[in-house]
Amino acid sequence: MGGRDVLERGSRCLLGLHGARGPVLSPMAYWFDGTAVWMSTPARGMKVSALARDTQCALYVAPADDEGSGAVASGRARVFSARDPRGLVLHGPTISAALAVLALRNAASIAGYLADAPRIPSRFLPRNRVVVRVVLDDVEAVRPPALTPGIAPALPTVVPPDVRRALTGRRRVVLAALDGDTVRLAPAVWRAGAGAGLPLSLPAGFDLHGGAPAAVALDADSRGRPTEVSGLSLSGTLTPGPALLAERVTWWHGSDLTTAEVPTPNSTHGAITLPD
């Protein structure tokens, strides 16, 4: 299956952006129209601010099963909002149609939003959201690395126990790294290894120089309930090997998002720390 076929069949992705301190990863619902990917996000969210600084972004869609291929893509984004009235007027019908298909392709999530509406902050509701269109200039299929013997690294103890419980033991992750001025994404696997950092296995041909700013993200399936979404991203530096030297951790649970420093990124490597 080619990369465009994966995009057409999928409905959720990880979006990679240029953050203030390096690449940032965020799970998103999307619709692919054959040329561009359409998404929606809170108007005052981090993603809108990041795309205002740099429109280059990338996304990864996981395979439907462990034996298949996923897709990585890159392109340029445009945010349609009240701050862009000309864009809304010129592209209004297209935007409306894209939102309708996006809702249809993610009907379970829409139903979850309706069920959880009393617990969702107003900034996440449709009236306070914007539309993002990413015109893709590169799409390719990619097969995630095979799972080799090993265990997932211990998650930082600053992450709340309920989030760690949802994610503990997951070894399939997504890596975002800066390659010059470009954010690149690839599926990865936590692997066994010694030395500094958290070792990763990457797909063949995904080569990056040591010292690149990087982030690794993993999340748990919420089964369409936005208040039950859990995930985290470890940010830092990619070293030869490769491995991630984690400096910061950002975790999300429902609509709550928190970032904290990881003061000793290697102190738990190789240890087993169970959630409380």
Image (cartoon, rainbow, N blue to C red):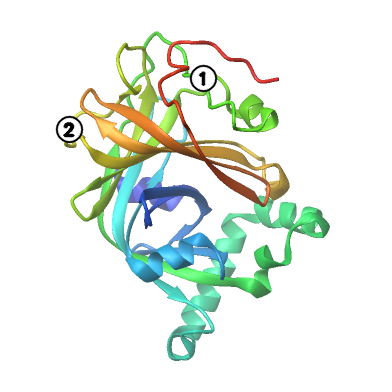
Residue at 40% from the left image edge and 32% from the top image edge: 246
Q: Which mark is residue 24?
A: none
The residue under label 2 is 205
Nearer the observer, 38 or 104:
38
Q: State the separation of the CA atoms marked 2 and 1.
A: 28 Å
SS category of the residue bearing label 2: loop
Which class describes the residues within 10 Å of circle 1: few (<14), some (14-19), or many (20+)?
A: some
Across and down, in percent, residue 87 comes to 43, 86
Q: Are marks 2 and 1 in contact (CB under 8 Å)?
A: no
Left or right placement of residue 230 versus residue 62 in this view: right
Across and down, in percent, residue 225 comes to 71, 46
Q: How many marks?
A: 2
Across and down, in percent, residue 93 comes to 50, 83
The residue under label 1 is 154
Tell which residue pokes out farthest to the front in this image: 263
Across and down, in percent, residue 76 comes to 31, 65
